[in-house]
Image (cartoon, rainbow, N blue to C red):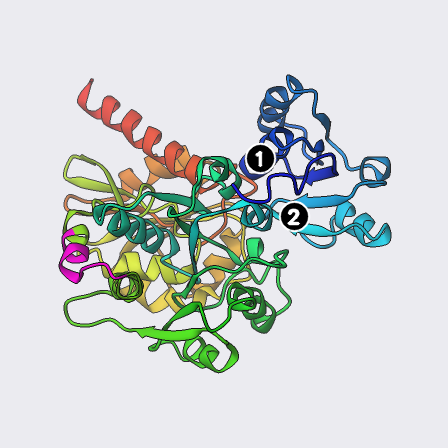
């Protein structure tokens, strides 16, 4: 690592005790900081994480945020899901305490070359494929960020000459200051997270922070087919490299090839990586076939565009399971496609009524109170040759910890259904 004494003896409060907060706490403790962690949730998850930290004598507050826990700190590190209206951030401004994100913390220490990937859709696939291409070329690479493993969880292992393929969300970019990836990649831009941002311009402003510190020695890779993204070339000091889909390459693959060209990775090597790629868990993931009904786990589809992608890549009639926590999305844009390809829609979560109203004249709509109930109901509605697709178009929060938990519960419900049908 670099700057290993930067945080030594500093009094640092971490806001949010999930994977990101746990990784920050462990890293800062190892660096000799005086670490405190606060989370207003008191549940099985926060208690589990807290038990891991108490052995290190790290100060912990769960179930609330208190003023005394923030007062006198040198720095606040916030997890991605924490909004600006949260009490610790309000207090930090009042007490003039600097606030940074988890990726900013890791960046200060990181000696490796960082390739940062953002966009409304496709981030996880592209982040993974970039890493796979680097590994195929003999490089040492870490796959981190919004993809699942926090940047802070691995930075202690990194050396100069390593690479980081980093998936970054708009939430993670909000509290960066010096973060400066060698290569920044913006895949696309569409309506998302309007439950957090007042409008699309505010959401775009958060995305644009990925290149705000770049200079002429860096690269910004942009989708030239997305008019909003293409125009960002006018706002950067970095060298701009464009990508676009071709008859032989989808947009994600074209984006990876653009990055590979900067890094000097052979195109044929990348094409071999694409051929061997088995996909991402929770993204159009085959689960099982029961009585000639196929079950597909697309829990990672938290946007309408992702679900549209799923519909266009499935040829058979679809029984769709959707819903969750609404992010300010306009579900009208998928209504025609649902009428064309869906046999039935099963809705769950708080967004049920909004989605139902947006689908208008589509009559084959049912509701379920749990995901397990939705799986069983979907199977009862499906016909031989159909596909039961979990593709929520919504955040998992409120019903699940994250999209991974939602996907695992879906898969377990399908496996249980298979046992009941086959007597296994």
- Using a 10 Å C-alpha cutoff, classify the residue at mark 2 as few (fewer than 14 neighbours), some (14 to 19) or many (20 or more): some
In percent of width and height, residue 306 lies at 36, 58
Q: Which residues are magenta?
A: 264-272
Which numbered dot is residue 82? 2
Of 323 and 93, the residue lying toward us: 93
Q: Residue at x 57, y 28 (%)?
A: 45
Q: Residue at x 23, y 27 (%)?
A: 418
Residue 400: in sight, yes or no?
no
Q: Is residue 299 magenta?
A: no
In percent of width and height, residue 118 lies at 44, 60
Considering only vertical position in the picture, is 37 above or below 187? Answer: above
Residues under numbered marks 1 and 2 in contact, where contact means CB atoms less than 8 Å apart: no
Of 191 and 352, the residue lying toward us: 191
In whole angstroms, how far apart are the C-alphas of marks 1 and 2?
11 Å
Q: Which residue is mark 1?
A: 18
Mark sitting earlier along the chain (1/2): 1
Considering only vertical position in the picture, is 109 above or below 68? Answer: below
- Using a 10 Å C-alpha cutoff, classify the residue at mark 1 as few (fewer than 14 neighbours), some (14 to 19) or many (20 or more): some
Q: Is residue 190 left or right of residue 308?
A: right
Q: Is residue 268 magenta?
A: yes
Name the image quarter holding residue 37.
Answer: top right
Name the image quarter holding residue 73.
Answer: top right
Secondary structure of the residue carrying numbered label 2: loop
Secondary structure of the residue carrying numbered label 1: loop
Magenta segment, principal secondary structure? helix
Of 285 and 381, the residue lying toward us: 285
* Quadrant, the C terminus: top left
Residue 343: in sight, yes or no?
yes
Of 291 and 144, the residue lying toward us: 144
Which numbered dot is residue 289? none
In percent of width and height, residue 320 lies at 33, 50
């Amino acid at each position: 690592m670099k700057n290993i004494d930067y945080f030594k003896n500093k009094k640092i409060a971490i806001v949010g005790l999930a994977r990101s907060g746990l990784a920050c706490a462990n890293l800062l403790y190892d660096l000799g900081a005086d670490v405190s962690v606060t989370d207003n949730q008191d549940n099985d998850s926060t208690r589990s994480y807290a038990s891991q930290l108490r052995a290190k004598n790290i100060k912990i507050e769960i179930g609330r945020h208190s003023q005394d826990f923030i007062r006198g700190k040198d720095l606040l590190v916030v997890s991605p899901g924490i909004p600006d209206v949260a009490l610790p951030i309000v207090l930090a401004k009042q007490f003039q305490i600097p606030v940074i994100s988890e990726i900013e913390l890791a960046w200060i220490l990181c000696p490796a070359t960082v390739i940062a990937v953002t966009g409304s859709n496709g981030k996880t696939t592209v982040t993974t494929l970039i890493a796979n291409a680097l590994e195929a070329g003999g490089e040492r690479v870490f796959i981190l960020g919004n993809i699942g493993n926090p940047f802070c969880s691995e930075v202690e292992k990194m050396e100069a000459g390593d690479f980081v393929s980093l998936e970054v969300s708009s939430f993670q970019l909000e509290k960066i200051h010096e973060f400066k990836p060698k290569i920044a990649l913006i895949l696309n831009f569409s309506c998302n997270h309007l439950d957090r941002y007042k409008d699309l311009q505010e959401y775009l402003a958060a995305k644009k922070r990925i290149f705000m510190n770049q200079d002429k020695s860096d690269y910004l890779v942009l989708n030239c087919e997305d008019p909003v993204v293409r125009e960002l070339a006018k706002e950067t000091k970095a060298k701009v490299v464009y990508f676009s889909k071709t008859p032989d390459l989808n947009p994600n693959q074209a984006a990876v090839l653009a990055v590979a060209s900067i890094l000097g990775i052979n195109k044929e090597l990348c094409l071999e990586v694409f051929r061997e790629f088995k996909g991402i868990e929770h993204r159009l993931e085959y689960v099982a076939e029961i009585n000639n009904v196929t079950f597909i786990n697309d829990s990672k589809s938290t946007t309408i565009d992702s679900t549209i992608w799923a519909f266009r890549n499935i040829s058979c009639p679809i029984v769709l399971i959707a819903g969750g926590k609404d992010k300010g999305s306009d579900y009208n844009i998928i209504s025609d496609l649902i009428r064309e390809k869906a046999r039935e829609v099963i809705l769950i979560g708080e967004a049920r009524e909004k989605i139902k109203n947006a689908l208008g004249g589509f009559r084959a709509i049912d509701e379920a109170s749990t995901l397990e109930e939705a799986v069983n109901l979907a199977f009862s509605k499906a016909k031989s040759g159909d596909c039961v697709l979990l593709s929520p178009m919504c955040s998992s929060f409120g019903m699940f910890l994250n999209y991974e938990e939602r996907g695992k519960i879906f898969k377990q419900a399908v496996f249980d259904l298979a046992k009941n049908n086959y007597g296994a």
